[in-house]
Image (cartoon, grey):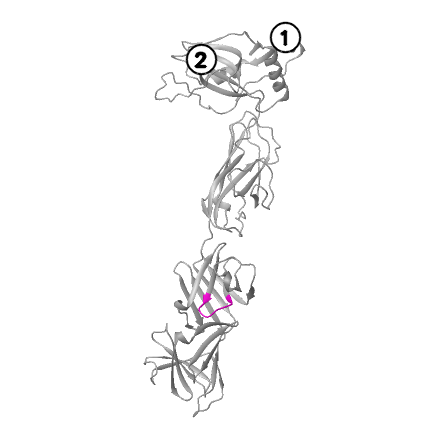
């Protein structure tokens, strides 16, 4: 058995270079007839051996040319290289070398020749005559076989539900010695780096691998030395329901194993991909109408939506101008306030004057006023302002939250908490909420009321609220 050593070209003065070192080389060996078997002879195609050696630098070295197993056990010597010349140990007739093998070596080799294995487990080695070290080696196949390989060019960063289509380029090569024939190519998503060569389904299997929808592509036959560049179906998407994290985008060539190849090591490609839900620029939710309740005697004010407070007295200034005229000003308002007339049942937006003062410019608002009792001389026990629409807008990157009643914003962030969960959802909680919080799903475009203890956590519990949602990406 010989010792295989590696020399770096900068220090190895007897550099031997093979242009395709690492590829499996074709040396044709036909199954022998009865007469050859009787004498333990094999006919080896000398032209193929010469073709392999044609790219080897032959000057300044003295080498043995040998036929060996993959663990460098020599079972036959072909010849030698001296002073740039090749001389053969065996006679060459009609392009073939007739070589006799030992009994045990012949039995093993004969089985591999007859089986037509793509990778029979033999090689040609070039060994230094003085040190006996292996300088170069070429793995062999005995019949022409295709040898396919696949590579992907793809985006490393992506988000759940993202369209891959035109963003992925597939390169397939046939480095073998025979045409490949038509095969399937499957594009996969995996949680694990190692993707076995097999057929996968759309559902994630035990290996943590799933076939992408529209991810199966028909690949036409490729001639030896040929190359094919493909793009997948433009409908190819990443699944929407993915947790953020590390994944691998994979390609499996000929998952049904229709072809017999000299090697299937390059039939699987897997590349690192970081998947994180892309945050939207803005989410706008249109909710059912809200109602403002105000009790003049106690100055108690609250706005409620779907049974929850969305604004309370701490955010508001209140002033009574007359028994039936009230001024209301939210803490976030700087240049206007509302004037409520419970006698005329109207609401006005006032600008151009100070709060709790008469005058200014009035703009009528489309807000319904429902007083309980009261007159021009006696304040009502309570009045309600009914808003036709409530909008919630949230800009994640700016961390900007707005709650709008009609055209007026009543958001005041110190009284609201927001939280982002994974898979991407946003939770909103108001300071007075003791049982429920809101959960916004920008992917499904849903708003749910979930238990308070699930704030910042995933929850299967909850009640969907009527809301129309727009998401700007």
Q: CA distance from mark 1 to mark 2?
A: 30 Å
Q: Can I make out residue 322 in this image?
A: yes
The quarter of the displayed image where residue 217 is located: top right
In the rendered image, residue 429, in percent from the top left (x then y), is placed at 46, 65
Main SS, magenta residues = loop
Q: For the view shown, which residue lies furthest in the right direction?
A: 34
Q: Which mark identifies residue 236?
A: none
Q: Which mark identifies residue 39?
A: 1
Q: Using residue 164 as the reference point, say whether residue 397 is left or right of it.
A: left
Give the answer, above or below, for where 412 lies relative to 421: below
Badge 2: residue crowd in 10 Å (few <14, some 14–19, many ≥20): some
In the rendered image, residue 272, in percent from the top left (x then y), is placed at 47, 41
Residue identified by numbered label 2 = 132
Look at 50% across and 58% down and name the residue there.
Answer: 457
Q: Which of these two is toward me, 2 or 348? A: 2
In the rendered image, residue 279, in percent from the top left (x then y), is placed at 44, 56
* Callout 1: SS: loop
N-term-proximal mark, 1 vs 2: 1
Q: Which residues are magenta?
A: 429-436
For discs 1 and 2, the disc positioned in front in the rendered view: 2
Q: Using residue 313 as the reference point, say whether residue 43 is left or right of it.
A: right
């Amino acid at each position: 058995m010989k010792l295989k050593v590696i020399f770096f070209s900068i220090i190895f003065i007897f550099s031997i270079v093979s242009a395709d070192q690492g590829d499996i080389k074709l040396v044709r060996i036909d199954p022998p007839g009865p007469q050859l078997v009787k004498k333990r002879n094999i006919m080896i195609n000398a032209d193929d051996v010469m073709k392999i050696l044609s790219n080897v630098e032959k000057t300044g070295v003295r080498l043995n040319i040998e036929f060996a197993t993959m663990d460098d056990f020599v079972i036959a010597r072909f010849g030698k290289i001296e002073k740039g010349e090749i001389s053969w140990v065996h006679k060459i007739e009609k392009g073939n070398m007739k070589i006799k093998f030992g009994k045990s070596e012949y039995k093993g080799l004969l089985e591999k020749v007859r089986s037509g294995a793509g990778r029979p487990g033999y090689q040609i080695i070039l060994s230094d005559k003085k040190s006996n070290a292996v300088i170069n080696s070429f793995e062999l196949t005995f019949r022409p076989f295709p040898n396919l390989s696949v590579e992907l060019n793809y985006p490393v960063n992506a988000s759940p539900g993202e369209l891959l289509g035109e963003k992925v380029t597939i390169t397939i090569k046939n480095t073998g010695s025979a045409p490949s024939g038509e095969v399937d190519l499957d594009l996969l998503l995996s949680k694990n780096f190692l993707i076995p060569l097999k057929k996968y389904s759309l559902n994630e299997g035990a290996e943590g691998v799933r076939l992408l929808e529209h991810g199966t592509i028909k690949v036409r036959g490729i001639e030896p030395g040929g190359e094919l560049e493909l793009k997948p179906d433009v409908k190819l998407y990443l699944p929407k329901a993915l947790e953020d994290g590390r994944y691998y985008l994979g390609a499996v060539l000929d998952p049904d194993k229709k072809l017999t190849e000299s090697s299937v090591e390059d039939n699987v490609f897997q590349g690192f991909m970081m998947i994180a839900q892309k945050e939207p620029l803005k989410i706008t939710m249109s909710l059912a109408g809200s109602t403002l309740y105000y009790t003049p005697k106690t100055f108690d004010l609250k706005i409620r939506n779907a049974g929850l407070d969305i604004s309370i007295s701490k955010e508001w200034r209140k002033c009574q101008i007359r028994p039936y005229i009230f001024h209301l000003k939210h803490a976030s308002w700087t240049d206007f306030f509302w004037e409520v007339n419970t006698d005329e049942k109207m609401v006005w937006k006032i600008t151009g004057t100070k709060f709790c003062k008469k005058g200014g410019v009035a703009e009528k608002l489309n807000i319904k006023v429902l007083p309980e009792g009261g007159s021009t001389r006696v304040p009502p026990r309570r009045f309600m302002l009914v808003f036709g629409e409530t909008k919630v807008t949230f800009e994640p990157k700016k961390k900007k939250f707005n709650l709008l009643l009609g055209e007026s914003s009543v958001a005041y962030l110190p009284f609201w908490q927001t939280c982002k969960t994974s898979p991407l959802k946003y939770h909103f909680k108001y300071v007075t909420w003791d049982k429920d919080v809101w959960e916004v799903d920008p992917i499904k475009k849903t708003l749910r009321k979930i238990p308070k203890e699930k704030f910042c956590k995933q929850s299967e519990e909850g009640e969907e609220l009527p809301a129309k949602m727009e998401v700007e990406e």
